[in-house]
Image (tube, helix red, strand yellow):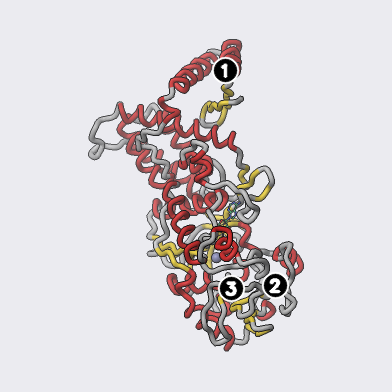
């Protein structure tokens, strides 16, 4: 399998440290608010990564943290405490906030068929481990205390900028939000391992420590939780691209200083989902959640389908129009599968499979092994459904097999398939068929007339690699 590694800035052959178990760590959500659909995009692609590894035969252990400690707005230890902000906003305790949004997160990912990590670790359950970790860094001379806080001195770390490839000046810009700079740091990139002095009154989550009552810095949880659950080295560490210059850079600095060993073999980063204003952000008031998509009548799996049609290393622009078009394509897909299933034998358990089945499986696997090219994998699925050298039983077997990675519930008949059973949808499908035939017969006048007729009815056709999609316009 080929996988892009941020550390080497190149596509590499994936070779796990131990062939018997692939170890993966995923930075989990900060639970002071709902996840936005951008966060969820990253979790969907990470899910495909894990399921692909399992599909090609590896055993996988994946660990994810839940950031339930109040953290500051900026990655670089500055700004307001996010958890406390959530608690004030909703008149709840910080613990209630954390529990509420943790539950909401798991409910979202379940709706998106994203598998839960094998180990889910709450940051607040590891406080004593952070203290021990910091004590070791302290003994090894990597820390200093200023104004009551314990800082990590990045000038002592080996190759601090290796992940981002940026020089320190660029990193300084990347780590500076529009918040005030901490004057107690020796270098601007230094980060806090343990806070005892908070700029904010009523810091709600506090624990005793050798440095005084306080709370851990943010980056430390991922280092310690992964060391405890995956050991000193792991294969893949995942997260969104925003984490490269600060969070992941700092995780590496402190972990490798602690163990004295290289830590992560492959760094995997998902690109951003963007909206009209550029970056999708939680702290900027209104934002797009899965519940909002559902309220607008979308099926969560249409969003998964939308995401899987993009490559994880490319930015993806979100609009309700493109989601609507993905939803149409998704239901069309399901409908096609349903027709095939209705015409297959009841019992496909003992179907004798032809060579063509293996060939399709191989092609599907190749797309995924090509740095997780999910869009091409879906194209193979689509071509397979149309294949003349496969019977319906074989097709259903293959759908089942491919869906173990894509997780689009292609074989599940849900009652809410409004688009499929909608009379209008049936009519549109018929017209699309007619137009395709006209095009095949080079009768472009008729093809255009059909397109225009639909346009007059407010239906726009879109020719894509996977066939014709349609969407309603005003
Ligand atoms: P957070 O809860 O803010 O720590 O983010 C959870 C995950 O979502 C992290 O891996 C982030 O890197 C990722 N992420 C944040 N914003 C976006 C976005 N707009 N698109 C895709 N992933 C994102
Ligand atoms: Zn992390």
Is residue 73 placed above or below 426 in the rendered structure? Answer: below
Q: Quadrant of ligand 1?
A: bottom right
| Quarter placement of the C terminus | top right
* Residue at numbered disc 2: 189
Tell me if I can see residue 24 in this picture.
Answer: no
- Residue drawn at 55 percent across, 31 percent down: 465
Q: Nearer the viewer, mark 2 or mark 1?
A: 1
Q: In the image, residue 39 lies at what x, y percent?
A: 55, 53
Q: Secondary structure at mark 3?
A: loop
Specify the quadrant of the image occupied by residue 150: bottom right
Tell me whether the residue at label 2 lies in contact with that at label 3, contact meaning CB atoms closer than 8 angstroms.
Answer: no
Q: Secondary structure at mark 2?
A: loop
Left or right of 242 in this view: 369: left
Crowd around label 3: few <14 · some 14–19 · many ≥20 (10 Å): some
Q: Secondary structure at mark 1?
A: loop
> Real-space Cα distance between discs 2 and 1?
58 Å
Is residue 349 placed above or below 3 in the rendered structure? Answer: above
Q: In the image, residue 87 lies at what x, y percent?
A: 55, 63
Along the line of sight, the residue nearer the viewer: 391 or 145: 145
Left or right of 47 in this view: 284: right
Q: Nearer the viewer, mark 2 or mark 3?
A: 3
- Residue drawn at 49 percent across, 15 percent down: 434
On residue 203, which mark appears?
3
Is residue 260 placed above or below 417 in the rendered structure? Answer: below
Q: In the image, residue 360 lies at what x, y percent?
A: 41, 38
On residue 457, which mark appears?
1
Q: Earlier in the sequence, mark 2 or mark 3?
A: 2
Tell me if I can see residue 247 in this picture.
Answer: yes
> Real-space Cα distance between discs 2 and 3?
24 Å
């Amino acid at each position: 399998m080929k996988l892009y590694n941020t550390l080497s800035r190149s596509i590499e052959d994936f070779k796990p440290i131990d062939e018997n178990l692939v170890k993966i760590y995923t930075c989990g959500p900060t639970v002071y608010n709902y996840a936005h659909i951008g966060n969820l995009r990253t979790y969907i692609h990470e899910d495909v990564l894990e399921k692909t590894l399992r599909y090609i035969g590896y055993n996988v252990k994946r660990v994810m943290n839940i950031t339930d400690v109040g953290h500051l707005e900026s990655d670089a230890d500055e700004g307001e405490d996010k958890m406390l902000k959530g608690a004030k906003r909703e008149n709840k305790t910080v613990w209630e906030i954390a529990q509420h949004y943790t539950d909401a997160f798991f409910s979202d990912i379940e709706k998106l068929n994203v598998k839960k990590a094998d180990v889910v670790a709450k940051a607040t359950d590891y406080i004593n481990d952070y203290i021990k970790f910091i004590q070791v860094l302290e003994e090894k001379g990597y820390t200093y205390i200023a104004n009551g806080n314990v800082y990590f001195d990045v000038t002592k770390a080996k190759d601090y900028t290796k992940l981002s490839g940026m020089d320190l000046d660029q990193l300084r810009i990347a780590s500076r939000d529009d918040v005030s700079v901490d004057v107690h740091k020796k270098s601007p990139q230094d980060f806090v391992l343990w806070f005892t002095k908070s700029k904010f009154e009523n810091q709600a989550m506090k624990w005793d420590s050798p440095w005084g009552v306080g709370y851990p810095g943010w980056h430390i949880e991922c280092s310690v939780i992964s060391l405890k659950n995956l050991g000193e080295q792991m294969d893949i560490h995942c997260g969104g691209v925003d984490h490269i210059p600060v969070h992941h850079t700092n995780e590496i600095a402190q972990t490798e200083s602690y163990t004295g060993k290289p830590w992560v073999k492959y760094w995997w980063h998902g690109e951003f989902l963007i909206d009209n204003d550029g970056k999708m952000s939680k702290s900027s008031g209104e934002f797009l959640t899965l519940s909002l998509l559902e309220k607008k009548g979308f099926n969560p799996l249409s969003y998964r389908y939308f995401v899987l049609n993009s490559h994880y290393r490319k930015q993806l622009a979100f609009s309700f129009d493109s989601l609507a078009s993905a939803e149409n394509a998704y239901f069309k897909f399901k409908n096609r599968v349903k027709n095939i299933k209705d015409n297959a034998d009841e019992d496909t358990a003992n179907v004798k499979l032809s060579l063509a089945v293996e060939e399709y499986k191989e092609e599907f696997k190749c797309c995924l092994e090509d740095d997780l090219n999910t869009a091409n994998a879906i194209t193979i699925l689509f071509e397979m459904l149309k294949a003349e050298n496969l019977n319906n039983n074989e097709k259903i077997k293959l759908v089942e097999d491919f869906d173990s990675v894509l997780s689009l519930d292609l074989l599940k008949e849900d009652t809410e398939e409004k688009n499929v059973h909608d009379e209008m949808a049936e009519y549109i499908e018929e017209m699309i068929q007619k137009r395709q035939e006209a095009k095949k017969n080079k009768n472009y006048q008729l093809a255009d007339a059909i397109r225009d007729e639909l346009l007059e009815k407010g239906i726009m056709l879109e020719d894509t690699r996977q066939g014709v999609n349609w969407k309603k316009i005003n």
